[in-house]
Image: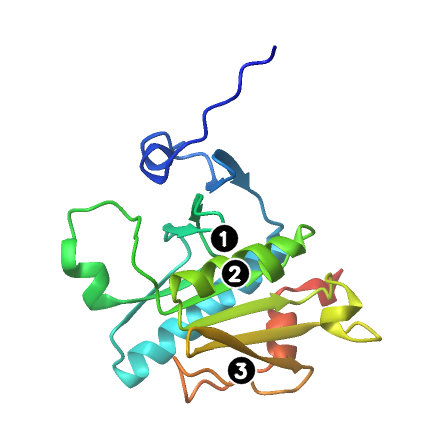
Amino acid sequence: MKAAIKKLSFEEFLAQYPDGSGIYELVNGEIVQVEATRAHKNVARYLVKSFDRESERLGLDYIVDKDIIFRTTNAYGEERGRNPDVSVVNASLWNSNVLAYGALTEPIQLAVEVVSTNWEDDYVDKLDEYQRLGIPEYWIVDYLAIASRSYLGNPKIPSVFVYQLIDSQYQVQQYKERDRIVSQTFPELAITVEQIIHASLIHKL
């Protein structure tokens, strides 16, 4: 008989987090490394800079980062540790305990996931978890049009999906090509899907 592997709690995940060797999440009770291509990181970096500039320009109470871990739960009550590609968190929440480590249990303001080959994680699992936690705004950036046609349409076109939390349920808007992405968190933000795709530098391949 093979012994069952004990699933880690969120606190145990933080205690065992491998420092200095990449980004990790807690999934199904196990520590899982999250890897990304350089194009993927280029997109995330572009959004971090865009959000940060907009927050400073308007004097908003936000901190924008790519290394914020927070606790979620799935439909079965299992704890997960998520680290979005881009996180926007209220500065007052972040600075309420500056001596604490970077993990949060409260909902952040905005989470962005840049889609990779395991696209269902972003469209299904994380969508459910972020809605359950109460994150007001969630972006799925599918700059390579990786997801199925049921999400992207036919033909598949690179898209950004913006989910807004209304009455505890996400309502979604799809943006494509030269569409200006509308954000409740950054209402004056002026970026398009084309600009995000361009930031990946895949056009240089």
Q: Secondary structure at mark 1?
A: loop
Q: Residues within 10 Å of mark 1 (few under 14, many from 20)?
A: few
Q: Which residue is mark 1?
A: 75
Identify the residue at image location x=59%, y=49%. Answer: 36
Query: Considering the image in quadrants, where does the N terminus appear?
Result: top right
| Vertical placement of residue 157 versus 76, above or below | below
Please tell me which residue lies in front, 44 or 158: 158
Q: Which residue is mark 3?
A: 191
Residues at marks 2 and 1 touching, judged by CB atoms closer than 8 Å: yes
| Of pointers 1 and 3, the one earlier in the residue sequence | 1
Q: How many marks?
A: 3
Q: CA distance from mark 2 to mark 1?
A: 8 Å
Q: Position of residue 30 (x, y in %)?
A: 49, 33
Q: Which residue is mark 2?
A: 128
Q: Secondary structure at mark 3?
A: loop
Residues at marks 2 and 3 touching, judged by CB atoms closer than 8 Å: no
Decide if residue 130 is on the left or right side of residue 147: left
Q: CA distance from mark 1 to mark 3?
A: 34 Å
